[in-house]
Image (spheres, rainbow, N blue to C red):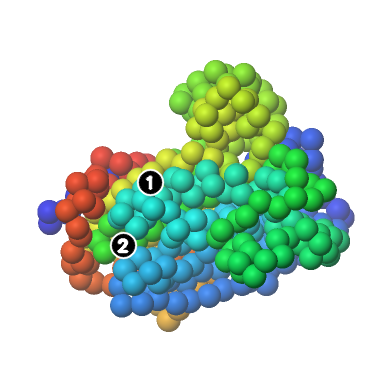
Amino acid sequence: MNGCILPTCVETSFLSTKGKLIVPIIFGSFCSPKTEKFSEDGGNARLRYGLSSMQGWRASMEDAHTALPDLDNSTSFFGVFDGHGGKVVAKFCAKYLHTQVLKSETYLMGDLAASVQKAFFRMDEMMRGQRGWRELAVLGDKLNKFTGMIEGFIWSPRSGESANDHVDDWAFEEGPHSDFAGPTSGSTACVAIIRNNQLIVANAGDSRCVISRKGQAYNLSRDHKPELEVERERILKAGGFIHAGRVNGSLNLARAIGDMEFKQNKFLPVEKQIVTANPDINIVDLCDDDEFIVLACDGIWDCMSSQQLVDFVNEYINVEQNLSAVCERVLDRCLAPSTAGGEGCDNMTMVLVQFKKPITFATTEGEQSSSRSAEENAETETK
């Protein structure tokens, strides 16, 4: 590879494939899905991106995303977040995860992998207590939003140097929810950070990042299902169990942000809880054979394999002027004609990032020593 190193009109409900077992997923009482899409395009000298998201047959939209081509002068950040049990954790991650990457001391030292791992854990920490409850309330429905705003007015720090002037400081707040343990709902998180010719992918859950190298799809993340041996071993050691492919008979994910009911063992570190936010991290050296990456929630991957999606993108990427239009085509392709089958009925979000050539950006010595090949780290899509 030229020296490149790779690694129906009635209300319908089904049990969620990823949320709480006791809560059915309502597909609504409407005759057709909500096909309105939120789409966006952007880029810089190094890359261009397009994204699109659609509610589909679901009664509400629980996906969220982040697209920042210029996180700083040399770094881009993209992420998809698929909520379960509600939208607030996904929206919280989309709003705050990248800010925690930026403020990390390890980020300033050039260790992007360590900074993004800390940011994943930091999400769970920030969602606890009065401040966490208030922020989640503001991101929630109208009643909670109003309550959160009122409590913020009453309980937030009053000094001119308060955390509300500098959101990343996240100062402790007293209030009626000071003992809030965090949300019982949760979210997947799959993010890609691009700096110079290095790509860092961090994932917790079953959203997925795929890279196209000369038309071949390579998975840069792993779907964290409870039946995987490493996940099963951690779940059982932490005192949990797996029933019908679900953690404690409830959650069809082994890793997620939020879901605090599965993270209550005070004798274990965060990475060894029944469900953990600890991300798998993959570091790839990009080269000119690399064409694009896709980050998408499982509403896409339930309908298309990684290779099928890469083939589909390659078919239209030079036809459409905007990359968001390619994403929209994918969403339309995956949308089910009815709710009878289940697949194609989920919320859908896709981010497409195309690299501009040549990819010849220099890396620091520290970055080179920490990088690994994509062939060592990525799984070739064989479906």
Q: Residue tagged by mark 2?
A: 195
Q: Residue tagged by mark 1?
A: 114
Q: Residue furthest front?
A: 159
| Residue 92 seen in this snapshot | yes
Q: Residues within 10 Å of mark 2 (few under 14, many from 20)?
A: many
Q: Is residue 332 above or below residue 283?
A: below
User: What element does badge 1 sit on?
Assistant: helix
**Residue 154, horizontal then vertical, whole percent:** 81, 62
**Residue 248, horizontal then vertical, whole percent:** 68, 26
Indicate which disc residue 170 carries. Answer: none
| Location of residue 162 by image quarter | bottom right
Q: Residue at x 52, y 29 (%)?
A: 269
Give, as a three-letter code, the residue at label 2: Arg
Nearest to viewer (mark 1 / mark 2)? 1
**Residue 273, horizontal then vertical, whole percent:** 57, 29
Q: Is residue 164 above or below residue 371?
A: below
Q: Is residue 47 above or below residue 114?
A: below
Q: CA distance from mark 1 to mark 2?
A: 14 Å
Q: Residue furthest left?
A: 3
Q: Residue at x 70, y 27 (%)?
A: 249
Q: Are marks 1 and 2 in contact (CB under 8 Å)?
A: no
- Of residues 206 and 124, the one drawn nearer to the viewer in this rendering: 124
